[in-house]
Image (cartoon, rainbow, N blue to C red):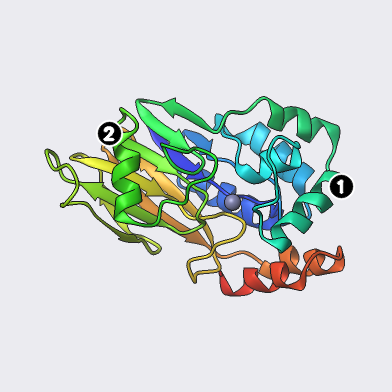
Amino acid sequence: MRVAVITDVHANLPALEAVLEAAEAAGVEETWCLGDVVGYGVEPDACADLVRERCDVCLVGNHDLAVLGALDISSFSEAAAVAVEWTRENVGESTLEFLRTLEPSGEQEGIGLFHASPRDPVWEYVLSREQANAGMDSHPSRIGLIGHSHVALFFNRPEGEETGGTRGGQAGDGALLDLSRGGWLVNPGSVGQPRDGDPRAAWLELDTEAETACFHRVPYEIAMAADPIAAAGLPQRLADRLHIGQ
Ligand code: ZN
């Protein structure tokens, strides 16, 4: 089965629409979302409606939980906390009801799904080999899909190796992974607020039978997402960062 894996939408509707259109054109059969549907952007309800309608599975992320009041935001950055408060004041009840039904981890086709990391599905950023090894040790699936860092990347541990052989790195548009051997953690990158230097919206095309994954980036009209952020009174930095992908 061919699956579009998306994550960290962050209420960016133009980016979400661009990614879903590209995934549909690629002929995927399912779409899995790893969470953080809301927070940062100004269209939480439209994004939640689209995710609910188009995704076969959706996890809850730390920003979603914060908006629900289920997570303490004292450790959020100031801009992130301001965005959580804004979203709480501007989100509809049906979006909150939808987010309340979601879990931060799951499994599809024997593949582990985690918003953040396997050992801490809500909070931990997986950016180092040590974190990747710990993550692979803490869940039984050979392949895990993660979000949260907003960086398109992969980690691979060869079969039979406990730690030393793990390799990983960032993955650009068109990078293709052969997932057929060893342990894997793969992050598609963020739909709505990329932080890996490429401002285009990110998604991952997963083929569960061929055991391959291909990273994709999709251009979209960034000003359509960024300008309303500043106009809504949210921190200018949240608008600016969309243009540079950081
Ligand atoms: Zn996020």
Mark 2 = which residue?
142
- Could you tell whether 151 is left or right of 122 in the image? left
* Mark closest to the chain's N terminus, 1 or 2: 1
Q: Does the numbered disc 1 mark a residue whose Cβ is under 8 Å from ligand 1?
A: no
Q: Is residue 213 visible?
A: no
Which quarter of the figure has residue 76?
Answer: bottom right
Q: Does the numbered disc 2 mark a residue whose Cβ is under 8 Å from ligand 1?
A: no
* Numbered mark located on residue 49 in the image: none
Which of these two is toward me, 130 or 22? 130
Q: Amino acid at mark 2?
A: Arg
Report the residue at 42% width, 37% height from top. Answer: 119
Mark 1 = which residue?
90
- Could you tell whether 116 is left or right of 167 in the image? right
Q: Is residue 51 visible?
A: yes
Report the residue at 70% width, 28% height from top. Answer: 100
Numbered disc total: 2
- In 3D space, how far apart are the residues under numbered discs 1 and 2 (Cα atoms)? 40 Å
Q: Amino acid at mark 1?
A: Asn
- Circles 1 and 2 in contact, beta carbons < 8 Å: no
